[in-house]
């Protein structure tokens, strides 16, 4: 019972830390918005939306931390870099490629890149510490040693990259691109383009 209470307390604390870091990142973007600009209401109230985002991110990060055989700064830094790449860097590459010349001014892009720094490099290390994975070394059994050559790593990465691109374009066209408002936002009003060779099918 005590361990359950501790886990509930840690989860609430992690959600609070995430919301603070997420809000700090949002302020970086918000300070660069033109005066008088407004945002469209979402499917749920802002507070509920932030709570859903916090719970989802905390759940994923917690799972990665508690299941990792690493600990300390090795885990904190590596996980922070991966989190930043997946959550911020990859989406903003899409923003730069599709929207830099349409709806997002080029001078606004650096703020979008900086937006993810608080959650990645403040929240993630704190999560490692809160979840008691702050020790510098974690015992790894000898049978876990990963023996895989450079060639094996390269072909696996290549396959994953191809799968990612295929899923990205398929989801972008068959799901997101069917929304006429989204097509207009990306500068492609009217019927969906059938061409796969243009910039017309973002996710």
Image: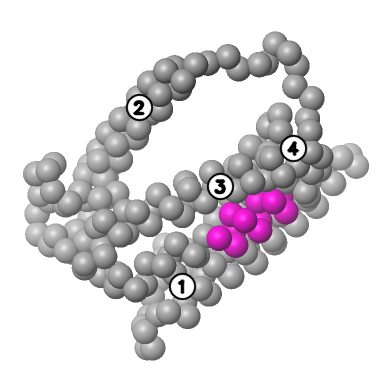
Q: Residues within 10 Å of mark 2 (few under 14, many from 20)?
A: few
Task: Tell me if 36 is positioned left or right of 49 in this view.
Answer: left
Q: In which quarter of the image is residue 179?
A: bottom left
Locate residue 88, reporting x and y percent: 46, 54
Residue 193: mark in rendering: none
Marks 4 & 2, CB-CB < 8 Å contact: no
Q: Can residue 48 be seen in the rendering of this structure?
A: no
> For the residue labelled by badge 1, is the local secondary structure a helix, a strand or a loop?
helix
The spot of residue 202 in percent (x, y) is 25, 50
Tag 4 secondary structure: loop
**At x 14% / y 60%, what residue is drawn?**
188
Segment colored magenta: 117-127
- Residue 126 is a magenta residue: yes
Which residue bears the numbered disc 1?
29
Could you give the CA–CA distance between mark 4 and mark 2, rounded to whole angstroms? 29 Å
Q: Is mark 3 on a helix, strand or loop?
A: helix
Which residue does the image show at 38% across and 88% down from the upper left? 35
Q: Distance between the residues labelled 3 and 4?
A: 15 Å
Q: Which mark is residue 158?
A: 2
Q: How crowded is mark 1: few (under 14 residues within 10 Å), some or many (20 or more)?
A: some
**Which of 109 and 150 lies nearest the eye of the viewer?**
150
Q: Position of residue 32 (x, y in %)?
A: 43, 79
Identified at 32% across, 53% down, the residue is 94
Q: Element at badge 2?
A: helix
Write down the residue under mark 3: 81
In the foreground, 91 or 188: 91
Whether the residues at callouts 3 and 4 have beta carbons within 8 Å, the answer is no
Q: Which mark is residue 71?
A: 4
> Residue at 41% across / 67% down in the picture?
110
């Amino acid at each position: 019972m005590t361990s359950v209470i501790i886990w509930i307390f840690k989860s609430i604390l992690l959600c609070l830390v995430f919301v603070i870091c997420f809000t700090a990142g949002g302020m970086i973007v918000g300070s660069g918005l033109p005066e008088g600009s407004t945002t469209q209401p979402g499917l749920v109230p802002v507070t509920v939306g932030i709570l859903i985002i916090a719970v989802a991110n905390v759940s994923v990060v917690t799972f990665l931390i508690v299941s990792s055989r690493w600990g300390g700064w090795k885990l904190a830094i590596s996980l922070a870099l991966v989190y930043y790449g997946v959550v911020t860097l990859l989406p903003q590459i899409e923003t730069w490629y599709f929207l830099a010349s349409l709806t997002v001014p080029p001078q606004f892009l650096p703020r979008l890149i900086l937006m993810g720094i608080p959650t990645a490099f403040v929240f993630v290390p704190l999560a490692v510490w809160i979840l008691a994975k702050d020790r510098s070394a974690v015992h790894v059994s000898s049978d876990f040693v990963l023996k895989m050559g450079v060639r094996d790593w390269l072909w696996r990465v290549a396959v994953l990259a191809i799968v990612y691109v295929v899923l990205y374009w398929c989801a972008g066209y068959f799901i997101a691109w069917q929304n006429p408002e989204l097509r207009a936002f990306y500068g492609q009003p009217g019927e969906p383009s059938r061409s796969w060779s243009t910039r017309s099918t973002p996710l």
